[in-house]
Image (cartoon, helix red, strand yellow):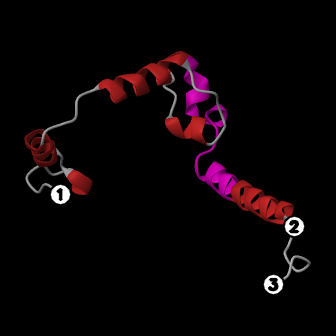
Amino acid sequence: MTASQTPPANDFVRWVEEKSDAVMSDLGDKFPPATSGPEALHAETYTQRIEEVLLGHEPPDEALLEELAALEEAPPLSDEELDRQALESGGADADPTTPE
């Protein structure tokens, strides 16, 4: 391919941005902004979801940032603790006697 046949870099950047916008739009349909849901009715008890921030619907609030910082600082769970939690969880059928 010669230099005259190479598409301009801006075409690729525009294509990536268009694809990104399409994906964000699709995800936005699956996760509508909180202002349209029941959370908007009870703002005083609303807990921000990470999806709202990642999709650009809301800026992260202080409580979410503190929760993420606490998760980062938490020690990793041992294999025994992970096993215990898995056995306590009922899974999709909510039956703890048949752990997933």
Whether residue 56 sits left or right of residue 9 in the image: it is left
Asked if the residues shown at circle 1 and circle 3 are in contact, with their CB atoms under 8 angstroms apart, the answer is: no
Q: Residue at the location (21% across, 50% down)?
A: 94
Whether residue 64 sits left or right of residue 77 in the image: it is right
Quarter the N terminus occupies: bottom right
The range drawn in magenta is: 23-43
Q: Distance from label 2 to label 1 (Cα)?
A: 52 Å
Residue 43 place in picture, x, y as percent: 57, 20
Give the vertical position of 88 relative to 49 (above or below). Answer: below
Asked if the residues shown at circle 2 and circle 1 are in contact, with their CB atoms under 8 angstroms apart, the answer is: no
How busy is the neighbourhood of tag 3: few (under 14 within 10 Å), some, or many (20 plus)?
Answer: few
Residue 32: within the magenta?
yes
Q: Residue at the location (61% across, 34% down)?
A: 34
Secondary structure beneath dot 2 equals loop
Q: Looking at the image, which residue sits at the far front?
A: 2
Residue to which mark 2 is pinned:
8
Counting residues from the N terminus, which is met first, the one under dot 2 or under dot 3?
3
Residue to which mark 1 is pinned:
100
| Amino acid, disc 2 | Pro
Residue 58 place in picture, x, y as percent: 64, 31
Give the vertical position of 96 relative to 49 (above or below). Answer: below
Asked if the residues shown at circle 2 and circle 3 are in contact, with their CB atoms under 8 angstroms apart, the answer is: no
Of 80 and 10, nearer the camera is 10
Query: What secondary structure do most residues of the magenta stretch adopt?
Result: helix
Counting residues from the N terminus, which is met first, the one under dot 2 or under dot 1?
2
Q: Looking at the image, which residue sits at the far right?
A: 4
Residue to which mark 3 is pinned:
1
Q: Distance from label 1 to label 3 (Cα)?
A: 54 Å
